Image (cartoon, helix red, strand yellow):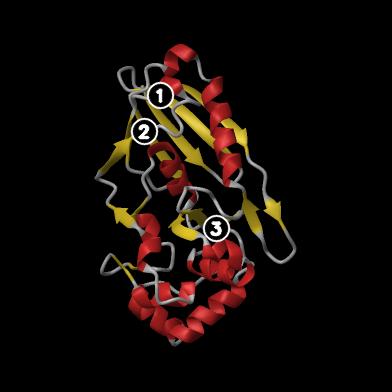
Amino acid sequence: MFLGIDVGTQSVKALLYDAQRRQVVDVQSAAVDLISKADGTREQLADWWLAALGACLAAFNRSDRSRVVAIGVSGQQHGFVPVAADGRVLAPVKLWCDTSTLAECREITEAFGGEARCIAEVGNPILPGYTASKIRWLKKHRPGDYAQLATILLPHDYLNFYLTGERVMECGDASGTGLLDIRCRAWHQACWRLSMRSAIWGSYCRRWRSLARRSANCAPMWQPNWACLQASPWPAAAVTI
């Protein structure tokens, strides 16, 4: 039995698939609220995703849950989950649909030398949906939270972290942050410095890895809540189309 999890903008969904019978056994979903403001703010709390996932898992048949041997996670891209060194999420998560960072996009683009140079060097312009401007916004508007920032994760990367204890990003998702040189498949140092308004950036971005590589086993931080899955291996995150 395989468990698939999707962290969407409107809900968290979970699916059980029986590979031997080639059949979907069960599908559950739980709605997630959205913080919406007139300035373009579109945010969610990371705790809402965890509560929704817990509700989905609790709704599965206990016998079916006990047969799970592996888990795969997909989810919304581009969002910014600011994580402290101890694993706490420091602020509401700005989502891919958040447009409150237009000023920060302009600042990064102008400091970089214009949109054409951004595209030439990174492969993407700096857009409000991407992660880069959200980081700069945090430093400007929530400096106390920014001062505690240890790791930058996307929404489903955070769920992977909660399940495995690993802080890692898949390369395809990293390309949508506005911080990765998509041609060289490497972090672009100038974009990081401009987004963070700091020369010290290397410790925040951590690692990315190919989809083909395996990640880790489930971490003890979540096992007490969902003990039926504590022996499950954990594959690398997948990209949602």
- Whether pointer 1 and pointer 2 mark residues with C-beta atoms closer than 8 Å, the reply is yes
Q: Which residue is mark 1?
A: 229
Q: Nearer the viewer, residue 167 or 119?
A: 167
Q: Residue at x 60, y 64 (%)?
A: 144
**Alpha carbon separation for disc pair 3 and 1:** 30 Å
- Whether pointer 3 and pointer 2 mark residues with C-beta atoms closer than 8 Å, the reply is no
Give the mark, 1 or 2, whose residue is nearer the N terminus.
Answer: 2
- Horizontal and vertical percent position of residue 173: 39, 56
Give the mark, 3 or 2, whose residue is nearer the N terminus.
Answer: 3
Label 1 residue SS: helix
**Alpha carbon separation for disc pair 3 and 2:** 27 Å
| Residue type, label 3 | Trp
User: Dot 2, crowdedness within 10 Å: few (<14), some or many (≥20)?
Assistant: many
* Farthest-out residue, top: 63
- Horizontal and vertical percent position of residue 191: 41, 75
| Residue 175 seen in the figure | no
Q: Which residue is mark 2?
A: 218
| Residue 19 seen in the figure | yes
| Residue type, label 2 | Cys
- Horizontal and vertical percent position of residue 147: 53, 65
User: Dot 1, crowdedness within 10 Å: few (<14), some or many (≥20)?
Assistant: many
